Structures are given as C-alpha cells and as structure tokens.
Image (cartoon, coloured by chain):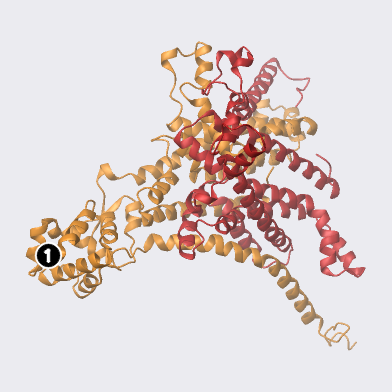
Amino acid sequence: MALPAYASPLERVWHYTYLVLCGLIFFFLIAPIVVIIPLSFNAQPYFTFTKEMLNFNPAGYSMRWYDLLLTFGMQEPQAERGWSWWMDAWQHATWIGVAKNSIIIGFFSTILATALGTLAALGLSRPEMPYRRAIMAVLISPMIVPIIITATGLFFFYSKVGLAHTFPGIIMAHATLGIPFVIITVTATLVGFDYSLSRAAANMGADPRTTFFKIIMPLILPGVVSGALFAFVTSFDEVVVVLFVGGYDQQTIPRQMWNGIREQISPAILAVATILVFFSIALLTTVELLRRRSERLRGLSPG
Amino acid sequence: MSDATTPLTTADGKPLKAALAASMMRAKRRAFLLVAPLFLFVLVTFVVPIGQMLFQSVHNDGFSSTAPALKEWFSEHPLGTPYDESAYAALASDLKLMRENRTQGQAGTRINYDVAGTRSLFTSTARKINRMEAPWKEALLAENEDWADPNLWRAMRSASNPYTIDFYLAALDHTRDKDNNIVPVDEGRAIYGKLFLRTAILSIVITVLCMLLAFPIAHLLATLPLAKSNLLMIFVLLPFWTSLLVRTTSWMVLLQQQGVLNDVLVWLGILNNDGRLEMMYNKTGTIIAMTHILLPFMVLPLYSVMRTIPPSYVRAARSLGATSWTAFRKIYLPQTLPGIGAGALLVFILSVGYYITPALVGGADGQLISNMIAFHMQKSLNWSLAAALASLLLGGVIILYWLYDRLVGIDNMKLG
C-alpha cells in the first residue's frame, strides 16, 4: 500500500506507525514458533537462552534432547551404536513407537476421509442435490462442535460397541474430524468446474467411470490432495479423542507430548516441537504449490 | 394447429414433462447416492455418539437397576407417604441384593451425586446387612441414623427412575430440597454458572483481541501487491499449520517465570528480577495463547473480504473532500463488516469449546467449561453430569453455528 502524494504529515506519521504495528503483529504470530527451534538445542535443561547460547558459544548448544528422543524407552540405550542399537531404537524407543502409531492412524483416516469426502463433494456441488444446505451443515459440523463433546460422545458409544481402545475406533473418529476439510477444499475446487468437459467426454463415448478418472479427477486432484493433507494434519495433531478412547497401544505423538507437558516438561518436548515445525513448513509449501497448480489448471489468475 | 393441444413428447413417445421429471429425479438420485456413504459414515461416527451423550445426560440407571424393591415401593407410594416399616423392609431387601451382586458402590455413587457423603452409607450398611434382623426401621436406624434423612429418601425416590433431569439441574447450579422443589444450591457450591460465564467472557475477550490484531494485518495483506502479500501470508499460514500442542508448548516456554519473555523484560530493565510477572497458569496465559492460536481464523476471512473491496471507493471519498479517517470509517469499514462477522463468529465458536490450551496454560482460574467436562469424565467419573454440561455447551454452539450459516453460509468457509 503506497502512500499517496497528497498525504499530509499527520497521515505520513500514521502510515509508518501502522506499518510498525503490522510488523509487531506479524512478530507476535511467528516468534513463538521460531523461538523454540534454538531452545531445543540448549545444553542445559532450561527453557530460556543461557549466556553461552547468547554468545554463540558452541558449548551452550548440544543435540542431547534429540538424542534423548531416540534413547527414551530403549532397552539398552548405552550400548554401542551399531545395527542392533538402531534395531532396539526402532522397536522400543517410545517416541519412535508413538510416531509409528501417528502415521498409521493418520494414513488410514486420511484415506477414509478423502475417499468418502471427495465423493460427497462431487454430489454436493451438483445443483440438483436435494437438502443440500442441511446435509452440508451436518457434514461440516465435526469441525465446529467442540472436540471435547465429540470425544465424550465417542467414549459412550465406543464403550458400548467395543471400539474403545482399538485402532479402527480412532481411525474412524479421526476420519470424521478430517472430513469437513476435505469437503471444503474439494467443493472450492469444484466451484467453476466446467461440466461441459464431462458432457463432452460422455458425448465421445466415455462411460461415467472413464469420465471420472480421465477428466474430472485430474482437474480436481490439487483440491483433493490439499484436502487430504488437511485431513492428515487434523489426525496428526489430534489429542483429545486419543485421550478419551485410545488405549495404551494407541498412543500418538500429540498424546505423548501431552503426557510430557503435564508430567514433567523437559527440552525434549521442544525437540519434538522443532521437528513438527519443520514438518508443517513442508506441508504448507506443498499446499501452496498445489493451490497454484489448481488455479493454473482452472485458468484462474495465478496467485 | 393440432400440435398446440397435444402434449409435447420425446422421440420415444413419452410426454416431455414426465421425461424431464424422470431425468431430474435420476440426477437427484445420483447426487444423493454420491453423498450417501459419507452421510452414513458421519451418522455412525458422529451423530449417533452425540445422541448417546444426550441420552446419558438424562438417563442413569445406577440406582434403579440395583434397587428393584425400593423402585416398586416408590411407585406404589406417592411423595408425602411417611417412610414406615414397609419402606425400610424394601431398603433392607435391596441392600441384601446389592451385597450379593456387589452393586452397593454403584448405587451409592448414584445417590452420592445428589446428596453428598452418602456413598459410604450404602457400602458400610450393605456390609453388615446380613447380620441385621427385622424390624428393619429400628435396625437400620440403629446402624446409622442418617437413613432417616428425608432428603436421602427424596434422592432415592428420584433415582429410582432412570430418566431424570437432575443432572441438568446440577449443571445449572440447582438441586431439589426434601420436598422435591427445585432450589438453587448454596452460594459456595455454585460453580457451573460462574464457569459458563467465565467461558463466555474469556471467549469475548479473545475474539475482540483477535479482531484488533487481525484487522491491520489483513488490511496490509489485502492492499499489498500479490507477490509481497503471498510472502507475508506465510506468517499467518505457518502458525495455522503448526501443531496446536507445539504452539501451546512454545507459549509455556515463553511465559514461564524463568522464561524468555520475563528474561527479556528484566534485561530491558522494565522489570526487576524479583518482580517477574506471572503470565502462566492463570487467565492471562489462556488469553495470550488462545489469541495467538485463533488469530489465523480471523485473518483469513477478513483478508478474503478485503481483497474484494475496490480501492477506488476510498479514493473517491477522498476526492470528494473526506478526511482519511472519515473515508475509512464511512466507506471502508462498513464494507469489511461481513469479514469481521464471519471471523468473529468462527473465533468465538472455536474458543468456547477450547480444551487443550486452557488445560495446559490455564492453571486454576484459566479453565473453561470444556475442562470441567473432562474433569467429570476422567476424574470424578460423574459421566451423566459431564454429558449434561456438554449438552448445554453443544446447544450454545449449535445456535452460533446456525447463526454463522445464516450470516456467512458454510459454503463460504475458506481454508488458507
């Protein structure tokens, strides 16, 4: 926003104040996320910058918390770091175990949410869909209803039908939580979708399945993938449902972080947090690239 | 012209109107079939569980299923009948049954929700019931004279029916006196009303803070050229994509008494070392952390509305003689109202149900209603009360959601 030439001195002062203000707000948004990255390399078990760290003295930094992440829960963390040590870490280290659970639950709930959500979005974006508004409201509601209420309901329901403390139970619950995101992103991609393309395909003799896979799918794929990423992140970040209906075998990364924060917070949590921040940077980049690709495909202006 | 009177037909001779209706029906059915699998799935994993929770809030058979004789006695004798030997005989036979099935704890717990301190009455008397003999009234009163308490009998009568609204009364800080009238609980025990109020107030404070912080940056993002604003957008989107627990953890690190923020303030000389601020484990912690976490939900709708406002309107106002403040107030601000409304409603809806952040940084007085629900689910195990509290919260959220759909339309919800 450029300052117009006719601006009065007061307006100039205000303009720069405004820019500084915006800078401070951006700082408020990003600083808490950035600050934990150096702190996770702290050589001391403190949550603040030590003198050595501020002087950039290498002695103030260490990888000990990352090391602790690997060794925590291992049977023989002191053994020599060879093949058997890594096997031990892979099988017994707590954080590796919960990461595996997170990925398994995230993967299957994403598949479920994306498949069902994409189909539904195709139906919902047709003008002839009956009760469109009401059905959409129900399907989006898992995003709006407080998670504690969903978890409470699931606890009662799962205890009755025997899905509590099982992987399928948590996968289904996480899929439900991810579905609104898939619907929102895929219907957004379908806005302005040129249905004459699918009619043209039908006209040329393609059956509905061929039309879907050859014409519709490639065009809406960016929306589907970013919806899937949203669904994955939702599952990957979810703790309350796991807390309520998950058993000892279904501990996930956020659940373990929750334990760590509640019981005894150590900089090892910051090491996990740092890894997750880089993970979210990668996801954000992917989604942004997909969005641009989608807009290019649909012939909208890039940006 | 005879064509005008005969109905139009399609090539295979069907009337055009019927053919069109059939084809529309087919299209409708196809659209519906695409949605049906997901709808069923959400029904099973979301709608049914919530229905189960609502059921739990009005249904508790902890006492009625374990005390059949009393249940029968209560159904034959209306309220006001004196509790004579026949009532005590029914009680004694139920206590025997409870001892046999080991359900005295369950029954006592159910009555204990209503009249505090009665669980041990059931467990201790049930332990000795086989050594007692008729007349039951004397025997039971000799064992513990609390059995004569009319309020206890009122509670047992009320619990002998598995369907009850008493948990809603408890969730609204009310109870029943010995004559079954609904009365407010003592001042000192009325906690839920205050908690609902605190949740509402904190959510409003957070919403207003988000509004104040989101407006300038959304405006900046909307007026900068795309290349620059896309770059700055990362500052909004990265927090949005970062794990909730990561963001909460980093606020815990920043706000601690020995944490980064206090260190910086001491280093700047604003505070001295003994006067470190307590910014965590209280309301301040909840407000700061939740404002940061919910800010992107305010910026994004505001930004997408501001993008569509043509800058020429403000310029026209300026050229007609308006000062920049008037032009902003009369021309620009009214056009951003849909964005402000959408963002504020979304942030408010999300914050009234927040659980994780208040639980970790809220301490005692930064807790919200969700934390109380979790407490009753996991610690006190009064599930019916938890369900009643959750149902009240759900009712509030549904009204807000309906409002959001009315004002904004859920189709217009955008992510990133």
Instruction: Locate residue A85, reporting x and y percent.
Output: 62, 37
Q: Colour of chain B?
A: orange
Q: Residue furthest right?
A: A204
Helix, strand or loop for disc 1 = helix
Locate residue A276: give its quadrant.
Answer: top right
The one of B372 and B340 positioned closer to us in this rendering: B372
The kind of residue tagged 1 is Arg
Locate residue B149: give its quadrant.
Answer: bottom left
The one of B303 and B280 positioned closer to us in this rendering: B280
Q: Residue at x 61, y 20 (%)?
A: A61
Q: Which residue is drawn at 52% across and 24% down?
A: A47
A229, above or below A24, in the image: below
Locate residue B343: give its quadrant.
Answer: top right
Relative horizontal placement of residue A296, taking residue A260 as reference (left or right): right
Residue under label 1: B131
Q: Colour of chain A?
A: red
